Image (cartoon, rainbow, N blue to C red):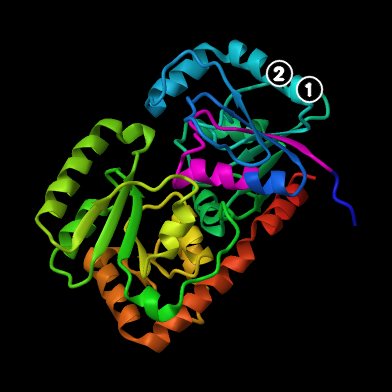
Amino acid sequence: MTTQRRSILLVCVSWRVDAVTGADRAVSSLAAALAAAGHQAVIATAAEQCDGNGLPGVIVEQLDLPLALPCTSHALREALIANEAKIQRSLSMLIARRRIDTVTFVSALWGLGRLRIALPHGVQRVLVVPALPQEQDMPPALAYADTIITPCDTVLRQATTAVWPTRRWLVVPNAPLHEPGVPAPVARKAEAPVRVLAPAGQDVGVLELIAAARAWHRHVEVALAPPGPDDICRGRALRQRCQMLANRAPNITLERVPGWAEIPGWLAEAAAVIIPCRRPTSNMTALEALSQGTPAIAYNTGVLSDLLQPLHGGPRRLLADVMHGPNALLFLADRLLADPATYRAACQAAQSRAQDFRPAHIAQLFCAAVS
């Protein structure tokens, strides 16, 4: 059966091609998957883009917003309210020029889902809810959407608990940005460092993990990605504190953040990847680690629970209780790496789990959801 070619616009004002983790990375992966499947994939963003190669087959369009990025959520919300008509005209011209048939607002605020934008007749409006937004953004975004998509069952359950109307919601998981790779030999991989890739934010748990790992016998390499928009100032202070702790610990290194296209290789070369976030809003780093055959260890909470719970073919536990803190994450990594048979099974289970999220499959699920 032939799939109809779609022309899909993904709206995310903060998106940059060099995003290495988080929701912006998920936008990249969806756009790349759609383009690879033969659809026209267009990303509308207000963020300045870095020089260099872009996503193969993906068109990037610049939105003109009356504020400088990065900015806080509050500043963006105020700018959107004050300039709704201007943004409407900008998007309408883009939709006509690119002959868009599906506009996907990738969140209620940063994806402009809260705006009452009149789309041309026949153009479908899709809202993606990667995590529950602030309450004032949700009602208008839900009211305007024809189709509502979330990347995992956890967000669906959270929305139901919050008494949002979720009867029409559909689950379309994230995909890794790149196809699964060929894993390194298990024996060599087990001797590699444990790696951490996370934004420099207050709620991601990196500082606590570094503090706990100073007494650990394994080498830990930490790459701190840029903080989220509401963490810019605090993120700088957090990075400095992480660097101070790492300087006093011979087994901890703060690494340069890999380029966006280098992430799969960097994760593939780790013995394991630890996700220290206590309230995760994205599973992209864990998903991309699994796709490279690298086990991911995290807290048993949120979107990471959905991704990692089914890994029954590996060790029984890759998930720690949040209440037990970062030492529990280190303990699980130790136990995993100490047993070659268990570790081999975990690596195999990781890549097997990633097969459920192959980009071509996720592109099919997305198109089916919006049809």
Q: Is residue 1 above or below residue 106?
A: below
Looking at the image, which residue is at 51% across and 30% down?
A: 109
Q: Is residue 313 above or below residue 303?
A: below
Q: Position of residue 239 (x, y in %)?
A: 22, 42
Q: Which residue shows up at 35% across the image and 46% down it?
A: 257
Q: Residue 361: which quarter of the image? A: bottom right
- Badge 1: few (under 14), some or many (20 or more) residues near its Cα, within 10 Å? few
Asked whether residue 300 appears in the rendered view, the answer is yes
Residue 20 among magenta residues: yes
Q: Residues within 10 Å of mark 2 (few under 14, many from 20)?
A: some
Identity, as a three-letter code, of the amino acid under mark 2: Ser
* Image disc number at residue 92: 2
- In the image, the segment drawn in magenta is 5-31
- Dots 2, 1 in contact, CB < 8 A: yes
16 left or right of 211 in image = right
Residue 189 found in image quarter:
bottom left
